[in-house]
Amino acid sequence: MTFSICVRERYTDDGGDDQVRYGVAVTTRLPGVGTLCPFASADGAVATQSLVNVELGRKGIEYLGDGLAVEDALEALLNADEGREQRQLHGVDADGTFAFSGEECHDWYGHVVGENYTVAGNLLTGEDVVEDTAAAYASDAHGDAPLAERLIDALAAGQAAGGDRREDLEVQSAALLVRNTETDEDDPYYDDLRVDATETPVADLRETYEAAKRGYEAALEKYGDETDGEERDGADESDEAHEGDGTDEE
């Protein structure tokens, strides 16, 4: 399996300005999903899966940054992809949503599109996985909890509905990304998390999130701005792990 969710939420910052946050979360019964599938920026969120082509995610985010609408950006990339029918690709930007599931994806596969979110999955136990993931998010959209926490809740609902049907594969992974239209300094470090190899990916992602959130808040309380510049040194360097056209069944 892989199943994933991309969301868009509008909010007002502390200065009274309108902002948008984007989130993407994913889990699969293979290691290292965070290096392959989820992409997010201040312009949108994208997930690429099934027979993974990482370039669909990387270039999708780049195209959104160039001003293309999400449906135009992702459809253009799929049209140039010879493996289109083996791909799943979905995402959101400031105004739209897009979801595609190729006819050669493995059952059960499919997607759900809501007003501000998309959910897609393949190699699942059934349609309930994506429906329950979507319902869990929609029931608490713009809730009081941070978006990262609510994305984990959505993954947990999909997993409880059956999740991946490949029960013989024990090593699994999960990841989440949250970005917003405020400055980079406003993004807490716990909004970019991965659990790369575990038998309990969603539970471990939640534990990692909670530990990272505690650590971030403790550092701010004790050291304030002294922490920020040091930790962000080199944060803008590109991630070489996101290069190439992968062939994993995510």
Image (tube, rainbow, N blue to C red):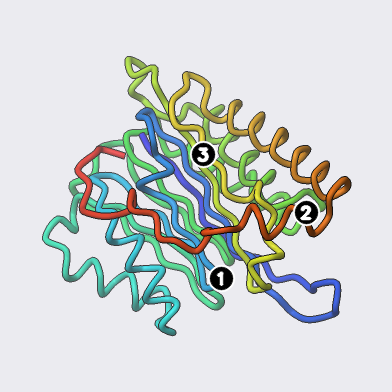
- Residue 159 position, x and y percent, is 52, 30
Task: Please say if 82 is above or below 189.
Answer: below
As helix, strand or loop, the secondary structure at mark 2 comes to loop
Q: Amino acid at mark 3?
A: Arg
Where is residue 216? Give x, y as percent: 75, 45
* Type of the residue with mark 1: Ala
Mark 3 element type? strand
Using the image, determine if residue 66 lies above or below residue 158: below
Please state which amino acid type lies under the numbered disc 2: Gly
142, 177: nearer the viewer: 177
**Residue pushed farthest right?**
221
Q: Residues within 10 Å of mark 3 (few under 14, many from 20)?
A: many
Residue position marked by numbered label 1 in the rendering: 42
- In the rendered image, the vertical position of residue 28 relative to residue 9, given as above or below: above
Q: Secondary structure at mark 1?
A: loop
Residue 176 placement, left or right of 47: right
The residue carrying pointer 2 sits among few (fewer than 14), some (14 to 19) or many (20 or more) residues within 10 Å by Cα, namely few
Q: Looking at the rendering, in which quadrant would you find the C terminus?
A: top left
Seen at 87% across and 45% down, the residue is 222
Query: What's the distance in space between the residues labelled 1 and 2, CA to CA?
Result: 20 Å
Tell me where residue 143 appears, x and y as whole percent.
Answer: 78, 54
Q: Earlier in the sequence, mark 3 or mark 1?
A: 1
Question: How far is the residue under mark 3 from the one under mark 1?
Answer: 20 Å
Left/right placement of residue 43 relative to residue 123 reads right
- Residue denoted by label 2: 143
For the point 71% across and 33% down, which residue is it?
211
Q: Write down the quadrant of residue 206 in the picture.
A: top right
User: Relative to the observer, which residue lies in front, 34 or 27?
Assistant: 34
Query: Can you identify the residue that label 3 sits on?
Result: 194
Asked if the residue under mark 1 is in contact with the one under mark 3, i.e. CB atoms within 8 Å, the reply is no
- x 44%, y 51%: residue: 38
